Amino acid sequence: SQTIHQWPATLVQPVGSPLSLECTVEGTSNPNLYWYRQAAGRGLQLLFYSVGIGQISSEVPQNLSASRPQDRQFILSSKKLLLSDSGFYLCAWSGRGTQYFGPGTRLLVL
Amino acid sequence: GIQVEQSPPDLILQEGANSTLRCNFSDSVNNLQWFHQNPWGQLINLFYIPSGTKQNGRLSATTVATERYSLLYISSSQTTDSGVYFCAVTTTSGTYKYIFGTGTRLKVLA
C-alpha cells in the first residue's frame, strides 16, 4: 500500500532563517506531487505541483521554491522565511484521479 | 478559473442527527473528491466521485456533473465526525491541479 511521509511535524523558525520541508511517498511510482499551505481556519492554497522529476509548476511566486530530486521525493524550501510563511504545510500525491495527503508540518515563524 | 463553493460554511449538530453538505462548481470537472480534515489537521480521503453515487457506512455522496454540484450525506452523526469537510475538483483544462472548495466546518455535540 502507498504511504506518504512528511517531516518535521512541527517547526519554529526565526524570521530570515532558511526552510527545508521534505515529503516522500512509498508504494507507487511516478506520482503527481503537491505542496499546499493552510492558514489557521482557512482553506487549502496550492503552492506547487510536479508531474515528474525536475518538473515543477508554481502557483505562488516569491518566497518559496520546490524541487523534486527523485521520483518520490518533494522538497519545499525558502532562503529567508517571512512572518507570513507561518501555516500548516501539506504534501500530497495523486494517482488515478485520487489525491492523498501526508500528516502535515506546522510552521511558526517568529 | 473554476469556482468551488461549499455550503453551509458552518454546521452544528446533535449526535445522531443527519446532515447534507453541498459543493457547487462553476465549470465542468473530470475529478471530484470529498475530504474530512480532523481536528488534528489530517486530511482523510472520503470519496472519489466525479459522477454518480457512492456509500461508505454512514457516509454517502452524490455528484450530478451535468448540474455542477455534489452532495455529501452524513447519517447518525457522531462526535468523531467533527472537523472540516472539503470538496476538491480538477478540470479538463487543468487536469493535475486540484481546486479546493471553501469548506464546511461541522461540530457534532454529544
Image: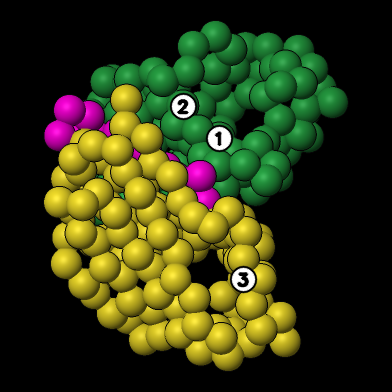
Chain colours: A green, B yellow
Residue picked out by circle 1 = A37
Residue occupying the point 72% across, 87% down: B110
| In the image: residue A104, left or right of residue B91 | right
The amino acid type of the residue labelled 2 equals: Leu
Q: Is residue B100 magenta?
A: yes
Please rate how many residues cluster around mark 1, counting C-alpha atoms within 10 Å: few if below 14, some from 14 to 19, many from 20: many
- Mark in front: 2 vs 3: 3
Residue picked out by circle 3 = B82
Q: Which residues are magenta?
A: B92-103
Residue occupying the point 35% across, 64% down: B71
Identify whether A74 is placed above or below A98.
above
Q: Are marks 2 and 3 in contact (CB under 8 Å)?
A: no
**Residue B29 visible to the viewer:** yes
Q: Which of the two residues, A74 or B14, is positioned nearer the viewer here? A: B14
- Labels 2 and 1: the sequence-earlier one: 1
Identify whether A98 is placed above or below A35.
below
Q: Quadrant of residue B29?
A: top left
Find residue A47 and name its label: 2
Q: Chain of mark 1?
A: A
